[in-house]
């Protein structure tokens, strides 16, 4: 059997160590806010375990009550960190009153001099419920978490089961207490140590995983419209062209420009101009297929690639987009405004450089604008030089 008191010292030092590690990582860069909450949770839990380790030398009800209260609060903060990470505000709003009830139940039980075995049952039940809630948040249907998130969730579930077994054991053993030796006690503390190690490093990696994804998004997504930016558009278009070449399927390209965009800015202000771009992007997304590639190249200029689409299909798609945008209404200070777009359409030649295709589509777009705007114009065919 393991020495329970020594294990509590290990848990205390380990949790405080994790708190310092995460605090240092969070301070060194723009990390996820959940990591700061997690670091505080680990610090509070570590202090709770150290207070528990000191209980035999300081046999005071105050020390025991402080240790139990700190452990409840620290575990609640750990659950709060998951809520912050997953963006679950409703859970956060319910967590505070539930934690206050848990603390009041523990303090009340000690004030009424509840037997140590029953106190252990109460604490085990409370901690088990918190762990079960963490497991549910990470493993619930629709969470769509990564493998790392699922691993942490199953870890919490195992700890919840261990705490439930400990509570059940305490019900049938009226003379047991926190430092009692036994298989259930040993399994519980070993499980707690495993949870501390795996979940500690796991949550750190989970936050880093999300931070990295956010940085990639910032580097590839236009912050105003939510469409991909110029650099990402060219990258994805190259991949789509390579796939099209392998599959010997056509691929179409459109250049799109909002008509009279300068007039919108001049008459209604740049904020309304931004709203026009956002409205166009949302309207366009609603008409596109999942595998279509649309990006903002700059200002009011957009480009759209349609894989597996010939010229006829591209013209139909462009007309559908043009009519959908014309039907959308932009609220302005001067009343509702109906936007229109001009579109240049080409089919990319299999061996054509993307810049050449863009130039042809841009030439067709210019023809559409000079021809009266609010229209679709087809670009000239790529010329091929055939050797003798």
Image: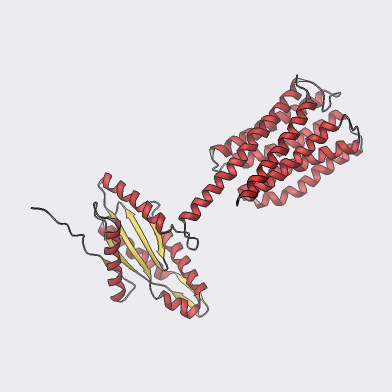
x 68%, y 34%: residue = 196
Q: Is residue 271 left or right of residue 326?
A: right
Q: Quadrant of the N terminus?
A: top right
Q: Residue furthest top?
A: 1
Residue 67 appearing in the image: yes
Q: Is residue 387 left or right of residue 207?
A: left
Query: From what the image shows, is residue 285 above or below residue 155?
Result: below
Q: Nearer the viewer, residue 362 or 123?
A: 362
x 32%, y 62%: residue = 254
Q: In the figure, residue 42 lies in which quadrant?
A: top right
Residue 47 percent coordinates (x, y): 78, 39
Query: From what the image shows, is residue 183 above or below residue 225?
Result: above
Residue 142 appearing in the image: no
Q: In the figure, residue 135 lies in which quadrant?
A: top right
State how the image is colored: secondary structure
Q: Nearer the viewer, residue 159 or 203?
A: 203
x 66%, y 35%: residue = 156
Q: Is residue 33 left or right of residue 262?
A: right
Q: Nearer the viewer, residue 14 or 301?
A: 14
Residue 50 percent coordinates (x, y): 80, 35
Q: In the figure, residue 258 lies in which quadrant?
A: bottom left
Residue 275 percent coordinates (x, y): 50, 69
Residue 330 percent coordinates (x, y): 48, 72
């Amino acid at each position: 059997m393991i020495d329970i008191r020594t294990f509590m010292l290990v848990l205390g030092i380990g949790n405080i160590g994790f708190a310092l590690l995460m605090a240092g990582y969070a301070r060194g860069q723009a990390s996820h806010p959940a990591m700061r909450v997690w670091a505080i949770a680990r610090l509070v839990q570590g202090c709770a375990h150290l207070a528990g380790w000191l209980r035999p030398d300081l046999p005071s009800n105050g020390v025991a009550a402080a240790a139990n209260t700190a452990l409840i609060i620290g575990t609640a903060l750990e659950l709060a960190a998951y809520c912050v990470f997953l963006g679950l505000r409703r859970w956060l709003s319910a967590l505070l009153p539930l934690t206050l009830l848990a603390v009041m139940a523990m303090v009340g039980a000690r004030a009424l001099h509840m037997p140590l075995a029953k106190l252990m049952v109460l604490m085990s039940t409370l901690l088990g419920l918190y762990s079960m809630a963490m497991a549910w948040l990470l493993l619930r249907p629709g969470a769509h978490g990564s493998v790392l998130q699922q691993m942490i969730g199953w870890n919490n579930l195992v700890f919840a089961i261990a705490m439930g077994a400990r509570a059940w054991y305490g019900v049938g053993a009226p003379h047991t207490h926190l430092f009692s030796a036994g298989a259930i006690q040993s399994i519980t503390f070993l499980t707690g140590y495993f949870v501390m190690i795996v979940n500690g490093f796991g949550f750190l990696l989970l936050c880093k995983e999300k931070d990295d994804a956010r940085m990639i998004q910032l580097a590839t997504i236009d912050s105003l419209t939510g469409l991909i930016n110029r650099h990402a558009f060219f990258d994805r278009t190259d991949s789509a062209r390579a796939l099209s070449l392998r599959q010997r399927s056509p691929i179409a390209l459109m250049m799109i420009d909002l008509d009279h965009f300068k007039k919108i800015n001049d008459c209604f202000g740049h904020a309304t101009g931004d709203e026009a771009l956002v409205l166009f992007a949302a309207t366009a997304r609603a008409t596109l297929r999942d595998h279509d590639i649309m990006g903002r190249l700059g200002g009011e200029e957009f480009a759209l690639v349609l894989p597996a689409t010939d010229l006829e299909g591209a013209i139909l798609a462009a007309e559908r987009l043009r009519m959908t945008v014309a039907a959308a209404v932009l609220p302005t200070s001067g009343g509702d405004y109906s936007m229109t777009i001009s579109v240049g359409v080409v089919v990319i030649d299999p061996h054509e450089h993307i810049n050449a295709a863009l130039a042809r589509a841009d030439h067709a777009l210019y023809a559409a604008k000079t021809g009266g705007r609010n229209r679709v114009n087809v670009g000239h065919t790529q010329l091929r030089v055939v050797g003798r």
